[in-house]
Image (cartoon, rainbow, N blue to C red):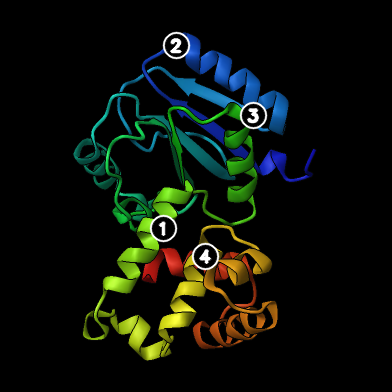
Amino acid sequence: MSIDTDKWLIYILGPQKMQNELLAAFLYKETGIVCQIENRDMFFCPTVDWPGKIMLFCDCQMKQYPDLLALVVAANLSKRPNFYPLLFNVMEKINVGDELVRLGVRGLFYDDEPLENLVRGIAAVRQGEIWLPRQLLSSCLASLRRREKPERSKELKSTLLSFRECEVLQLVMAGYANDDIAHKLSLSPHTVRSHLYRIFRKIKVSSRQQAAAWAVKNI
């Protein structure tokens, strides 16, 4: 069990009381993190007396993408930096866009995924990473490729990240290790390390966690 379990709280939101209780018991057993539940069919940032970080698990069963997007926008996550939203029971058949990641969602789990993936996702978020299904990750990368250089944000222009560096940073944000990034982009591990060195220097960070946090806000 990690020594940082006392710094985290898992807060489960969803309309199904029995499911919430079973999920809370399972996650506590597997992660050692205290869980609280609230049986409500909506997504919001609750008022919780907790001094650390909160993983906000929201049950998205039967919700269409426009509904998900509207709920996340309404939650105004940018003003709650200690909240780490994760969406579960998302229908795989709906076309999920990368806007959710840009709005602050740190994890997404489809309705047919095994419970073990939730445990892996929690571990990734605790390390400052983002947990996405491969399909959504591919969509995020495709969206990045479609952007025209003149449309990049002022932040990206000022840091002068290259297109390849943006791709590498997207994969870091998604939790990929260097070897996996190298395989995904057909690069050598040495080249990936070189890209990361330049990225860290340009955006003025010193860790993958800080780089991922920067990418969530700026890419």
Mark 2 neighbour density, 10 Å: few (under 14) some (14–19) many (20 or more): some
Residue topped by disc 1: 138
Mark 2 or mark 1: name the one nearer the start of the chain: 2
The residue mark sitting in front, 4 or 2, is 4
Label 2 to label 1: alpha-carbon separation: 34 Å
Look at 67% across and 26% down and name the residue there.
28
The amino acid at mark 2 is Lys
The residue mark sitting in front, 3 or 4, is 4
The residue mark sitting in front, 1 or 3, is 1
Q: Identify the image quadrant of the C terminus.
A: bottom left
Residue topped by disc 4: 171
Residue topped by disc 3: 34
Label 4 to label 2: alpha-carbon separation: 36 Å
**Tag 3, which secondary structure?**
strand
**Depicted 46 relative to depicted 51: above or below:** above
Residue topped by disc 2: 17
Look at 26% across and 29% down and name the residue there.
63
Residue 150, x across and y down, in percent: 22, 86
Residue 82, x across and y down, in percent: 50, 49
Mark 4 or mark 2: name the one nearer the start of the chain: 2
